[in-house]
Image (cartoon, rainbow, N blue to C red):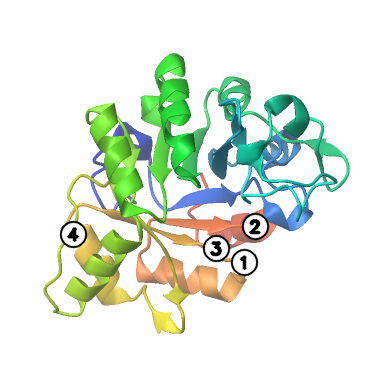
Amino acid sequence: MTRVRPRHPYLDRPTPIAFAHRGGAADGIENTAAAFRRAAGLGYGYFETDVHATADGRLVAFHDETLDRVTDARGRIRDLPWAEVERARVAGREPLPLFGDLLAEFPRAHWNVDVKAPEALLPLLDLIRAADAWDRVCVGSFSEARVARAARLAGGRLATSYGVRGVLGLRLRSLGIPAPVRTGAVCAQVPVAQAGVRVVDRRFVALAHARGLQVHVWTVNDPDRMSALLRLGVDGIMTDHLETLRAVFESHGVWR
């Protein structure tokens, strides 16, 4: 059942939405084409990923600033040319994908993209424009200024979520405390709690819905918490554990 009338075609589907976080990070091959293929095979149509730009401006789907944690290579992506980055292997076996290649390989998928670095923003918008993918990409970032700039440069065609400042403003308002909140976002993408402080509760969800915003919660891997969030009325859940979220959605009769 749709709780909020979608503000953008990106969200034009029944809620709740199941998001494959980094393609399903629990398998150890996060943000790789293999991970997203597996997610698609399980029936996921919404993928979450992250992007960085290489030294020569190629846009890589990858979470970390450096290659060190999950690949067999070393170095900051922004300092390396694509010719070097493409030799790295996640978990020693899977190559890092270019985001443009993912858009092409999964033409029906919807992408939630976290812009991890300022130099990645313009290449991302160029790719979305070239692929005419405005209806299937939502841009987010911890930086409110970055997502606001993305929305401004796209001229209203792009779906964006709130950054930290927007989420904080929305949370304060849900508690009855006046706070500024940017207009133009289509969703609030939030953790259940941050630094021990609860973010998502009935007041937060109610205020977001009253403002026409969907609420997507990350990154939820516990089935009991997934069920509790669904009962709370959230509009989407992002998970590393794809089979678990699918099973919970099926038990609630909301897997589509």
Three-letter code for the amino acid on which mark 3 is drawn: Thr
Three-letter code for the amino acid on which mark 2 is drawn: Asp
Q: Is residue 225 above or below residue 235?
A: below
Q: Residue furthest left?
A: 178
Q: Nearer the viewer, mark 3 or mark 4?
A: 4
Residue 218 percent coordinates (x, y) = 50, 62
Kindly check if marks 3 and 4 are in contact, taking CB atoms under 8 A apart as contact. no
For label 1, the residue is 221
Residue 195 percent coordinates (x, y) = 46, 80
Q: Which mark is residue 181?
A: 4
Kindly check if marks 2 and 3 are in contact, taking CB atoms under 8 A apart as contact. yes
For label 3, the residue is 219
For label 2, the residue is 240
Q: Nearer the viewer, mark 1 or mark 4?
A: 4
Residue 158 percent coordinates (x, y) = 31, 33
Q: Nearer the viewer, mark 3 or mark 1?
A: 3
Q: Is residue 226 above or below residue 106?
A: below
Kindly check if marks 3 and 1 are in contact, taking CB atoms under 8 A apart as contact. yes
Sequence-first disc among 1 and 4:
4
Three-letter code for the amino acid on which mark 1 is drawn: Asn
Q: Residue furthest top?
A: 130
Cα distance in 3D space between marks 2 and 4: 30 Å
Left or right: 151 with respect to 69? left
Cα distance in 3D space between marks 2 and 1: 6 Å
Kindly check if marks 2 and 1 are in contact, taking CB atoms under 8 A apart as contact. yes
- Secondary structure type for disc 1: loop
* Disc 1 residue crowd, few under 14, some 14–19, many 20+, Cα 10 Å: some
Three-letter code for the amino acid on which mark 4 is drawn: Val
Q: Is residue 22 visible?
A: yes
Residue 13 percent coordinates (x, y) = 38, 39
